Structure formats: C-alpha cells, structure tokens
Amino acid sequence: MADHLTKEKRSWNMSRIRATNTKPEMVVRSLLHSMGYRFRLHGKVNKKLYKSGILPGKPDIVLAKYRTVIFIHGCFWHRHQNCKKTSTPKTRTEWWQTKFDRNIANDTKHQQKLKELGWKVIVIWECEVDEYRKQTKDNRLKTSDNIKLIEKLKKELYNLTYYTYLHELPAEQMVAENLSKYKT
C-alpha cells in the first residue's frame, strides 16, 4: 500500500517525534523524584566521571551518585520482544527492518560500553510506563504495592541506595581511620 501522505508531510510528521522529554520519560522522572532520587538528564555527567561529559548512548536519566543510568525505550523503536506495540510497517519493510536492527545494535553497544565503564544499566519500556499510568489513573495511588513499575524501580534501585554502594567500596575506604596505625 502506498503512503497517502506527501513526502513533505511525512517528513514533517516524523520531525515531531521526540527524542527527549517524552511522556514516559517525564513519568519516570517524576516517580524517581518522588522516591527521593536526584538525577541528571540525557547522559550529562561531571567530566571527572566521563571525559566528554556525556555518557555513551545519552541515557535518559543518570544517577551519578550510584553510577546508574536509566534508558526509557519506546517499544516500537527499540523492538520490545512480545509487546503489542512492536509492529513492523507494511510498506518499505526492508528499510524499517534495517533501521530497527541498527537501533538494537546501538542499544547493545552503548549498554555494554557503560557496563565496561562501571555503570549499572536499567531499561524501562514504554509499555511498563503506560501500564503504570493506567493503574495510577484508575486508583490514584502512586505508591500502591501492586504497581509493577514502582516495584521494578524499587527492586533495581534499593540495592544502590545503601547496601551495594557500601560493599563496592574498597576496604581502605570503609574504615574511619588509616589502617597503617594497626599493622604490627
């Protein structure tokens, strides 16, 4: 089936698709902020943490204190498996498949690079955020225990806040005094 829009109109439509500050991103940011986390956006970090100041892949949310990044992926563009939002257009399927494959390869490459640099990577899918929005709209309880997105964030971030963060420190940094005093 041929595209019913002109090339200019299709280009204009595609230019309106946001890369940053999307609704799912805003929901997750609001949720993290209400949970007490402070963060930076779009991969920006202090140059002491990463030489260029922008992390590979430009993660949507950066929790620098915990060396954790969060990607909020659209199910269509990043090909969330077994999701009803992951469909392939019927026209120019080869072109679309190449684009999707390239997106997946870039995601994998950037996440691997971040892990090599010592960052924890969390991926949140658009459908998870949509489900959260539907649940909160229905019962207006953002802190309800039955909401999967909150549970996922709590599970992923709980270990960062205290327990894991302390255990990743070298032994010399976990004591209040210099160890050399006690060596005999």
Image: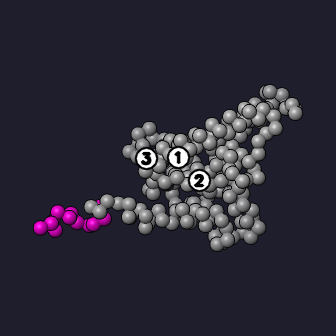
Disc 1 marks which amino acid?
Answer: Gln
Residue 78 at x, y percent in the picture: 66, 45
Three-letter code, disc 3: Leu
The residue carrying mark 2 is 123
For the residues bearing labels 2 and 1, Cβ distance under 8 angstroms = yes
Labels 1 and 3 touching (C-beta < 8 A): no
Q: Residues within 10 Å of mark 1 (few under 14, many from 20)?
A: many
- Disc 1 secondary structure class: helix
Question: Which mark identifies residue 111?
Answer: 1
Q: Which mark is residue 124?
A: none
Kind of element beneath mark 3: loop
> In this image, 81 relative to 5: left or right?
left
Task: Tell me: 48 left or right of 42.
Answer: left
Q: CA distance from mark 1 to mark 3?
A: 10 Å
Task: Please provide percent x and percent y for residue 151.
Answer: 61, 67
Other residues around mark 2 within 10 Å, as few (<14) / some (14–19) / many (≥20): few
Per the image, the residue denoted by label 3 is 117
Going from the N terminus, do you reach mark 2 or mark 1 first? 1
Kindly identify the residue that appears in the image at 63 percent across and 37 percent down: 102
Q: Please say whether residue 172 is one of the residues in the magenta stretch.
A: no
The magenta segment is 173-184
Q: Earlier in the sequence, mark 1 or mark 3?
A: 1
